[in-house]
Image (cartoon, rainbow, N blue to C red):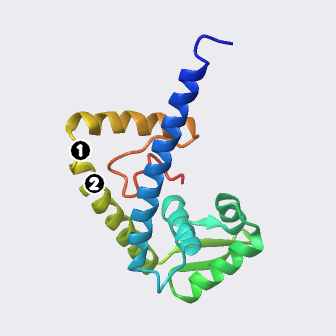
Amino acid sequence: MADDEGPAQGEDQSAVVSAVLAGSRLLVAVAARSLAAVEDKVTLAQFRMLVVLAGHGETKLVTMAELLGVNSSTAMRMADRLAGTGLMVREVNPHNRRESLMRLTEEGRRIVDQVMAHRREEIGAIVSRMTEAQRHALISAMQAFNEAGGEGPTHPQHPLGWADASV
């Protein structure tokens, strides 16, 4: 058994997992409340597609399916519904007629921005109730958590909090 393993390490990991689960419940509640204002326009799955388009810009249908972890026919049905509501445009790729390209409309961008602004506002209110030391510790902890999970670094000036256009 290595020096860093044993009952204390297991107890510590259990406490960390419990804390992350509690935090994730809070973040899911924030996300659900932020979607409430647009739930008559889009489902959660459709909103995920809009967010991917907001981050990636014009995207091929097959790439979208991969990014969402769904098959191409599911992505196509979602895209058709969103195009039908005027939130995105799906067109044939002029360079490869077998491919579909998707992009947000102004209304689609407005919905993503509205939901994300609500999330930022609510998370900002929660964070403002923390001490400065707690906020700094949270930044370090979340950066380490995101890196361990394979998520890229965040950028505070990006409207969606991303360093680049990835989701």
Amino acid type assigned to the residue bearing label 1 in the image: Met
Q: Quadrant of residue 73?
A: bottom right
Q: Position of residue 17 (x, y in %)?
A: 53, 40
C-alpha distance separating marks 2 and 1: 7 Å
Q: Quadrant of residue 67?
A: bottom right
Nearest the eye: 137 or 108: 137
**123 relative position to 150: left or right:** left
Label 2 with label 1: CB-CB less than 8 Å: yes
Q: Quadrant of residue 139?
A: top left
Q: Position of residue 149 (x, y in %)?
A: 57, 40
Residue 98 appears in the rendering: no
Q: Position of residue 133 (x, y in %)?
A: 24, 33
Q: Which residue is mark 2?
A: 126
Badge count: 2
Q: Position of residue 99 (x, y in %)?
A: 74, 70
Label 2 crowding class (10 Å Cα cut-off): few <14, some 14-19, many 20+? Answer: few
**167 relative position to 33: left or right:** right
Q: Quadrant of the C terminus?
A: bottom right
Q: What is the secondary structure assignment of the residue under circle 2?
A: helix
Residue that appears at 21% across and 49% down:
129
Give the numbered dot on residue 130.
1
Amino acid type assigned to the residue bearing label 2 in the image: Ile
Nearest the eye: 65 or 58: 65
Relative to 103, say whether 28 is above or below. Answer: above
Give the numbered dot on residue 142.
none
Relative to 40, say whether 108 is above or below. Answer: above
Residue that appears at 63% across and 78% down:
79
Q: Quadrant of the N terminus?
A: top right
Nearest the eye: 86 or 75: 75
Relative to 152, say whether 89 is above or below. Answer: below
